[in-house]
Amino acid sequence: MTAPHHTPDLFALSEIHGPVLRPGDPAYADEVTGFNLAALHTPDVVIGATGADDIVTAMRWARATGTPVAVQATGHGANFPIEQGLLLNTARMTDVRVDPTTRTATIAAGAKWSHVMAAAAPHGLAGLCGTSTDAGVIGYTLGGGLPVLGRAYGYAADLVRSFQVVTPDGHLRETDPQHEPELFWALRGGKGNVGIVTSLVTELLPLPHLYGGGVYCAGEHTEALLRAWVDWTRTVPDEMCSAFTILRLPPIPQIPEPLRGGFWARVAIAWPGDPAEGEALIAPIRAAAPVAVDTVEVMEHAALDRIHMDPQDPLPARESCLLLRDLPPDAIRTFLEQAGPTAGADFPLLMVELRHMGGAMSRPSPVEDAVCSRDALYFLDSVGVLAAPPAAEAIEQATQQLYTAMAPYGTGRTMVNIHGTPGDEQDRARAWTTEVYERLRHDKATYDPTNLLRYGHAVTPA
């Protein structure tokens, strides 16, 4: 069931401390634009929330008027345009408070991982960040959070101790394993289906430094490097985290030389242990093919953007993923046929990546959650940049062909944060097991029976 939609009067929002904007207002476009420019939002109203009080007021107004609600911090995960309704922009809520005694951080709704790293680094601590410190903490964690160091420490959701959340009834709640445990369960891996998180408390790790970077080979050596990497992943300890990536990089200034404009095969490395041990462990990777660029080094944890080198500037992107049971020889051959050198110089996907899973990510969370990727040994991810309509069509076709070809080796599921544009209910449900999806639907019916939070990767109330 969905709530009726109206174009409502904004008088009741006069208590909001941040801006309240409608289409045509001078700052509207800036307020609705996120990192992924492929999702062009056109809500009836956008609110620049400055704190939990603004979110409570907005949610109570939305409930009273039957206005559907979406939330955005950085927009890295924006893959669905918000039309009509209310968009809550939490980008002003960036407060991070670190307690070095308990090794925890209290993180506000709009904070990026870069804010957390800056606050934690003076204490020799770090959070379980993904491949970009520019991404928002909350949305990333609600989807489970796939860390660069996931094999060593698990999912970001595993370290959350509590949430402060505004549920669609307009109530501000505190939830942890002892208080409203079902709500706590649904927020860790169930994305934003049961409320809007205003802050969370998470554990930090004593990790001032790590050994990481990338080993790059020319694209012609893709097969040799890939086969060596797959064999190598079957031997390394849990603490060794890595990904194999095929990169077709455009000739633009944002990409450093000599990588700019090149076709590359890369193994990204992240090792939290002794650097000398890490160097010995990755020797087979460096010996697998002629190395053109090697950036693996000891770095401050806050510098981990240098490992995967994700784009730093907003761009229109099409992302998709698939969890893989394993990479047998047939799967490797299929992957190479789809994305390797023989795919052609005009292959439209900027990046196709295989992430090594397992390790701590295969073990149950200390407190049960809704993350459903613990049975995958590898993870397939791809990104295409939607620069123009012909490119968009080619990217869509290549994406569909890649995932159709690799489906026989998959678990049948995706990760909600990287799922891409959600389709019908059957497609959305692929982010979870059947049992977890049905449990989320019942939680949705409890906390959001009129489906106010219906945008993005939304679950249908039971």
Image (cartoon, helix red, strand yellow):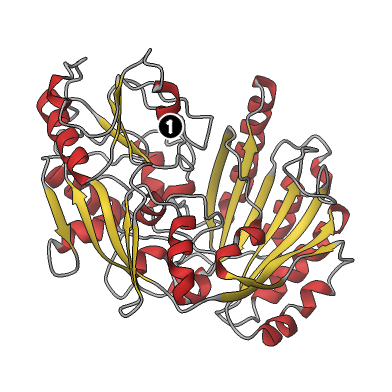
Q: Is residue 39 above or below residue 213?
A: above
Does residue 287 appear to the left or right of 327 in the view shown? right
Q: Nearer the viewer, residue 49 or 59?
A: 49
* Quadrant of the drawing holding the N terminus: top left
Q: Is residue 131 above or below residue 366?
A: above
Q: Is residue 125 visible?
A: no
What is the three-letter code of the residue carrying label 1?
Phe
| Residue at the spot 25% in from the left edge and 36% down from the top edge | 453
Residue labelled with disc 1: 80
Residue 56, horizontal then vertical, whole percent: 16, 40
Does residue 66 appear to the left or right of 136 in the view shown? left
Q: Is residue 461 above or below residue 3?
A: below
| Residue at the spot 75% in from the left edge and 63% down from the top edge | 226
| Residue at the spot 80% in from the left edge and 52% down from the top edge | 264
Residue 319, horizontal then vertical, whole percent: 56, 41
Does residue 211 appear to the left or right of 166 in the view shown? right
Residue 57, horizontal then vertical, whole percent: 15, 35
Q: Secondary structure at mark 1?
A: loop
* Quadrant of the drawing holding the C terminus: top left
The image quadrant that residue 97 belongs to is bottom left
